[in-house]
């Protein structure tokens, strides 16, 4: 417009008026957009969410679940006990996740990944536009920070050893703002499964404690809710000492259901601390808790009999395997004489096979698990069909065959003082030994008592010595002063690699002969070789072949006499939807983001 | 009935009960450790006198119990065959007083397991386990209570009677003993015991340790009594007559403590037996397969046993006559002591 | 009097020091350590555990560890918990408070019931009422408190009248102040019942025995002759004479305020010191255990102190002797 000199003021006023109108228009546009809630949609359009298949649920509601003890920390780096891991699992998320129902990997925070042809490099692409539970954005730097912290020796992360492949920690490299590359020293058959459980941590909260060396103290139970964040379905709301931990819905969670509704459905999870298993059963029955997990078989029967407004579910055999093993450690000269004699019995394979044939596994399943379990002849349970070797022998119990094997091994029967038959070894000494077991695990103590009676039929005098857990561990791993032991291991993944340290002769969990410098026997050397093969083979069929052979060797030489595996027994109120227990940990909360309350409203009684 | 005759009756009754337990091998139909895996948690078998056809038999008989198909603890009677209860049968071998081997049992069921009081989770006969268990539990209870009270009495008397620095030191030591976490010592001791120690000896060692450290309570109570007793007139006058300390203690002071000691004794024995339940909770109790009342009752801490298998309460019922007998004895003794005290 | 007080305080300090040293000794003696649980985890290597142990200074000699711990006690921290990775002190205070709520109420109730019942029972010694009470207490004595606790819980579930454990209901945050008090009281009914039921028989029997003995004393006859009423007689004359064993017991009641309710707390999931310490003992969380032991010792010392004071006050004979010395 032309500036007429004489009309400056009015023109300026008019111009101001124009600018004002435009500004008003723009700001009202912004206000309108904000009011419509679509200002976040501006970010939403770039937020790459994961659409999850499954039943559509209704939002709202709360579930209450009891835990056996308090979680000790919310920090995934130092959490070692199962309770802490269960709570953390609902609050954190990983790059690649193992779906507990199918036992296969699926994309999580990483929307896709590629493995290089030689199997040494994995390139993962992070989802864009995601936010932590406190609203701060997630980027590739958080991933890099997380990996650096996990791999840092000074932090002592409990999962650090999982990230050491081929003797060297994996190398992490940023490719671009969306992609990160991991380089391994050797090809890794397990593949992307190694990322499951590696929670991506918020750099904005943890970088300072890390630099000050106080990372282990971060995320303790007393942390205020606004100073802790994660990428999981729920975030911390409240913690009351000794009583309960309350999690609330994470509004920035990056998964939606098939209709596009943002998960999770539930508004709150309340964890109650109930130290006694029987008290947990009572609370579930009275309706104070909604879900009960990992019941014993007897309590399961009682609850099933009295089912009113809840259903009980038997998810089938889990991944726990219980076994009896003998002390085959090289004790050297400082071993007492009777220990050397006993070891001469234990080292005889025919002796171990005879023991295995004499054990009544069917009675164990029936009396200890009330039939809700499976007899085992190898470490792979029926709950892991992908890795079970169908061809290994399942010999039926036969006391005659046992006696025959013992006779072949040089043992013979004789009449003892109390007119009871006794087994004598080649030198004429009676076969007597003790089985130690943990006093806190009633099931294994029962198994030991049943085995004791079975071996009495063979003329062996066995004493069951229940020891408190840490004394037991001290004996088995430090002083090695024991004869035989009944123990159990719960594999945390279906993949055989999760128990690598048990089968490798140099492994720290190679219980019958710990941490050998060189394999003590030929077959242990063969197992070492096979485990190495399956570790580095990238072909699934090749891995299965190697591991099948391992199972055959274990069956032939019986370093561990496998006993039984319990079913996963759980229960939930009928009002809980999408309740699908799995046989991998966490058994009931693995799909906590999809659980919902059918009647939608809060439990009115509380 | 005079106190004296009541006392004799009570002692006779207790004696009979203890004799029954001591001869557990005879009264029990089976070996307490013999498992029967086909009959876990079998309910007690009712004894019949009238058979299915209405005929009356002088001697009782029973029917075999079999598991209902597909269940794990539901049983039904097999009425096709009536099995008479046999008396004075030859059964599992046992030792009287650990020395004489015998095989004769009061009752038996022939070739079929007779569960007069039901069976436990391994199918072991509960009646036999209760009888043999009594041996272990009563022994532990009596040894434990006796040890605690003896030590407590000695120390309390010394502290109360001589007073002064002895009293101070002993009472501080008593506090120390009360304060320390003996659980750690018990765990450590259990863990360091060689594995070849028989389970019973290991358990008795635990009991002895508990008794040896538990003297503080009775000691303090005794001390209180002795403190006031030694100022009583009759004691002062006896001293005036030239009585020595030993005479005073034996004749005047210690009898004053009788009331407290007796009360404590009657309470400690059941407490020791029941403490075994807690010890089993922590893994320090009597291990398998030895039977004891404490470890049988510890199965009652499980909810399902509590509600489904009522016969597992029976060991508690078996304890009742013993403990009531002790308490009655204590009452009667208190009464007779009171009348015979010197005033 | 002041000398007596000072002496006792000195003794208390000495005792606490002695207990802490012995507790350190014991805990080092017991086999195993906190990290052993991780030893049976196939994911964690043995080297990591050695590194962790060094990090938490578990491999240092006992004296060094004791001195460090003593220093942290002076700061009020009472050492570090391996499991929670925080100072032990705050972990203990809240839970101790919850336990004291329970045991304090139970102790008050027990004594309030035991004294009158015991006196009455001693009066009616040998008569049917007394015999009936004797039998009732004998039966209560024999029932193990674990079974009683679980039995009451089953009753609560079946009837639905009482909550099955815990300190508060789930919606506690939203309750009004009055509702909160009612909620806690409601949750306290079952555990307090169990505690009273297990402590009452013992106390009752002692009260009865002591009062029965005191009733034999001749001075009572004289007092009756003076025309003093029965009630005043019983409570102002007989009870103090019978007081010695009872005072010792009272001292113990005070002294075991923190430890008496362990099993009940575990079964009824009461958030007290009991389950926390039990877990720490089993997990070898050393400083938590030692902290708990010290706290219990403090109560014990206080309890005995109160008992001695009461003894002094109640029995003129002891006062006379003390003033003579």
Image (cartoon, coloured by chain):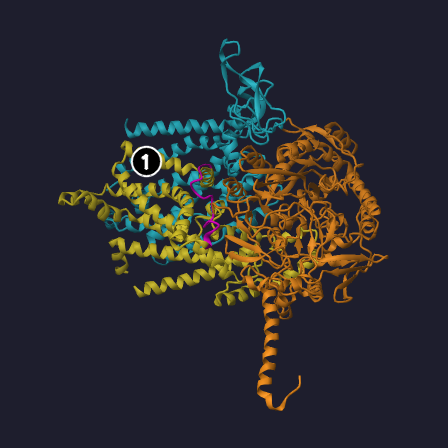
On the question of residue B154 being in view, the answer is no
Q: Chain of mark 1?
A: C
User: Which chain: orange?
Assistant: A
> Which residue of the protein is positioned furthest toward the bottom in this rendering?
A5
> Residues in magenta?
C158-173
Tell which of B321 and A412 is nearer to you. Answer: B321
Q: Position of residue B88 (x, y in %)?
A: 53, 18
Task: Name the dominant secondary structure of the magenta segment.
Answer: loop
Chain C tint in image: yellow
The C terminus of chain C: image quadrant: bottom left
Asked if residue A219 is among those painted magenta in the image, a careful observer would answer: no
Tell which of A268 and A510 is nearer to you. Answer: A268
Q: Label 1, on which residue? A: C133
| Count of all numbered marks drawn on residues in the image | 1
User: Which chain: cyan?
Assistant: B
The answer to whether residue B280 is left or right of residue A446 is left
Q: Position of residue A296 (x, y in %)?
A: 59, 39
Q: Position of residue A14 (x, y in %)?
A: 59, 81
């Amino acid at each position: 417009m032309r500036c007429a000199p004489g009309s400056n003021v009015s023109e300026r006023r008019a111009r101001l008026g124009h600018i004002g109108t435009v500004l008003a228009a723009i700001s009202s546009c912004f206000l309108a957009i904000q009011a419509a809630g679509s200002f976040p949609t501006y970010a939403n359009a770039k937020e790459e969410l994961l659409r999850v298949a499954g039943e559509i649920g209704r939002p709202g509601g709360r579930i209450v679940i009891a835990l056996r003890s308090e979680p000790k920390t919310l920090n995934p780096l130092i959490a070692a006990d199962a309770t802490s891991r269960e709570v953390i699992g609902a609050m954190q998320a990983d790059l690649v996740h193992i779906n507990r129902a199918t036992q296969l990997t699926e994309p999580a925070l990483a929307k896709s990944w590629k493995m290089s042809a030689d199997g040494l490099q994995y390139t993962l692409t992070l989802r864009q536009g995601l936010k932590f539970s406190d609203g701060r954005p997630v980027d590739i730097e958080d991933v890099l920070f997380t990996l650096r912290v996990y791999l840092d020796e000074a932090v002592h992360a409990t999962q650090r050893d999982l990230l050491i492949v081929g003797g060297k920690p994996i190398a992490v490299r940023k490719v671009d703002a969306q992609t990160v590359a991991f380089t391994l020293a050797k090809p890794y058959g397990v593949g992307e499964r190694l990322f499951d459980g590696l929670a991506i941590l918020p750099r904005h909260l943890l970088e300072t404690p890390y630099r000050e060396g106080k990372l282990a103290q971060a995320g303790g139970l007393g942390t205020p809710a606004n100073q802790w964040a994660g990428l999981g379905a729920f975030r911390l709301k409240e913690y009351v000492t000794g009583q309960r931990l309350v999690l609330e819905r994470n509004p920035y969670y990056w998964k939606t259901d098939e209709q596009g509704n943002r998960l999770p459905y539930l508004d709150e999870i309340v964890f109650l601390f109930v130290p006694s298993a029987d008290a947990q059963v009572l609370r579930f029955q009275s309706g104070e808790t909604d879900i009960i997990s990992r019941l014993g078989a007897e309590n399961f029967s009682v609850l099933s009999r009295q089912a009113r407004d809840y259903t009980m579910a038997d998810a089938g055999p889990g991944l726990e395997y219980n076994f009896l093993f003998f002390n085959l450690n090289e004790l050297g000269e400082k071993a007492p004489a009777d220990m050397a004699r006993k070891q001469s019995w234990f080292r005889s394979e025919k002796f171990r096979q005879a023991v295995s044939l004499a054990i009544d596994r069917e009675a164990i399943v029936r009396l200890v698990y009330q039939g809700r379990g499976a007899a085992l002849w190898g470490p792979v349970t029926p709950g892991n069909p992908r890795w079970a070797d169908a061809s290994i022998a399942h010999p039926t119990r036969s006391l005659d065959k046992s006696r025959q094997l013992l006779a072949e091994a040089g043992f013979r029967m004789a009449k003892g003082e109390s007119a009871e038959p006794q087994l004598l070894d080649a030198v004429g000494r009676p076969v007597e030994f003790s089985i130690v077991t943990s006093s806190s695990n009633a099931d294994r103590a029962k198994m030991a008592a049943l085995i004791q009676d079975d071996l009495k039929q063979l003329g062996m005098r066995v004493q069951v010595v229940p020891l408190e857990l840490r004394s037991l561990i001290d004996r088995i791993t430090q002083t090695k002063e024991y004869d035989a032991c009944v123990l159990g291991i719960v594999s945390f993944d279906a993949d055989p690699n999760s128990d690598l340290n048990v089968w490798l002769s140099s492994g720290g969990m190679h219980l019958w002969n710990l941490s050998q410098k060189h394999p003590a026997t030929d077959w242990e050397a063969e197992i070492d070789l096979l485990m190495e093969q399956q570790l580095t083979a990238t072909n699934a069929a090749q891995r299965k072949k190697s591991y099948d052979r391992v199972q055959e060797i274990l069956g032939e030489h019986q370093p561990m006499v496998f006993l039984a595996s319990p079913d996963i027994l759980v229960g939930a109120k009928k009002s809980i939807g999408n309740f699908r227990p799995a046989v991998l940990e966490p058994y009931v909360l693995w799909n906590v983001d999809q659980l919902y309350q059918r009647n939608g409203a809060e439990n009115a009684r509380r | 009935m005079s106190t004296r005759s009541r006392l004799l009756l009570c002692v006779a009754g207790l004696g009979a009960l203890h004799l029954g337990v001591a001869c557990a091998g005879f009264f029990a139909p089976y070996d307490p450790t013999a498992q029967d895996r086909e009959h876990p948690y079998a309910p007690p078998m009712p004894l019949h006198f009238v058979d299915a056809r209405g005929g009356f038999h002088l001697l009782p008989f029973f029917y075999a119990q079999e598991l209902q198909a597909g269940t794990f603890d539901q049983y039904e009677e097999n009425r096709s065959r009536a099995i008479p209860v046999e008396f004075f049968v030859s059964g599992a071998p046992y030792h009287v007083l650990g020395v004489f081997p015998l095989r004769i049992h009061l009752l038996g069921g022939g070739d079929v397991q007779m569960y007069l009081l039901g069976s436990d989770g391994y199918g072991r006969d509960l009646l036999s386990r209760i009888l043999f268990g009594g041996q272990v539990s009563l022994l532990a209870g009596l040894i434990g209570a006796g040890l605690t009270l003896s030590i407590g009495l000695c120390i309390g008397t010394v502290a109360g009677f001589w007073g002064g620095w002895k009293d101070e030191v002993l009472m501080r030591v008593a506090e120390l003993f009360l304060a320390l976490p003996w659980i750690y010592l018990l765990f450590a001791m259990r863990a360091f015991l060689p594995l070849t120690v028989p389970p019973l000896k290991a358990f008795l060692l635990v009991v002895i340790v508990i008794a040896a450290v538990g003297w503080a309570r009775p000691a303090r109570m005794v001390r209180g009594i002795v403190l006031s007793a030694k100022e009583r007139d009759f004691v002062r006058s006896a001293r005036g007559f030239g009585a020595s300390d030993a005479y005073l203690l034996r004749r005047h002071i210690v009898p004053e403590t009788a009331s407290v000691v007796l009360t404590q004794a009657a309470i400690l024995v059941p407490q020791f037996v029941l403490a075994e339940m807690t010890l089993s909770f922590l893994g320090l109790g009597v291990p398998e397969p030895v039977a004891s009342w404490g470890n049988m009752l510890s199965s009652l801490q499980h909810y399902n046993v509590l509600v489904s298998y009522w016969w597992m309460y029976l060991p508690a019922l078996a304890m009742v006559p013993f403990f009531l007998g002790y308490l009655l004895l204590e009452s009667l003794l208190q009464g007779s002591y009171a009348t015979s005290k010197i005033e | 009097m002041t000398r007596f007080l000072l002496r006792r305080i000195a003794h208390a300090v000495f005792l606490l020091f002695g207990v802490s040293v012995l507790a350190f000794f014991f805990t080092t003696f017991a086999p195993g350590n906190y990290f052993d649980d991780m030893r049976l985890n196939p994911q964690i290597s043995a080297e990591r555990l050695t590194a962790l142990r060094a990090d938490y200074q578990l491999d240092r000699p006992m004296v060094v560890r004791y001195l460090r711990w003593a220093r942290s006690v002076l700061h009020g921290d009472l050492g570090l918990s391996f499991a929670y990775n925080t100072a032990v002190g705050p972990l203990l205070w809240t839970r101790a408070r919850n336990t004291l709520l329970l045991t304090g109420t139970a102790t008050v109730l027990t004594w309030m019931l035991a004294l009158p019942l015991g006196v009455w029972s001693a009066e009616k010694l040998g008569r049917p009422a007394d015999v009936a009470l004797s039998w009732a207490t004998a039966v209560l004595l024999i029932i193990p408190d674990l079974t009683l606790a679980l039995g009451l819980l089953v009753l609560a579930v079946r009837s639905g009248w009482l909550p099955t454990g815990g300190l508060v209901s789930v919606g506690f945050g939203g309750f009004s102040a009055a509702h909160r008090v009612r909620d806690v009281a409601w949750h306290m009914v079952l555990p307090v019942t169990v505690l009273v039921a297990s402590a009452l028989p013992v106390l009752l029997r002692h009260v009865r025995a002591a009062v029965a003995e005191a009733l034999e004393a001749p001075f009572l006859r004289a007092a009756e002759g003076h025309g003093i009423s029965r009630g005043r007689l019983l409570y102002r004359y007989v009870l103090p004479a019978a007081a010695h064993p009872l005072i010792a017991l009272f001292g113990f009641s005070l002294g075991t305020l923190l430890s008496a309710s362990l099993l009940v707390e575990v079964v009824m999931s009461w958030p007290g010191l009991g389950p926390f310490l039990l877990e720490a003992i089993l997990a070898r969380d050393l400083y938590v255990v030692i902290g708990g032991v010290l706290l219990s010792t403090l109560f014990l010392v206080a309890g005995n102190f109160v008992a001695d004071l009461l003894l002094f006050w109640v029995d003129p004979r002891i006062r006379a002797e003390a003033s003579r010395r």
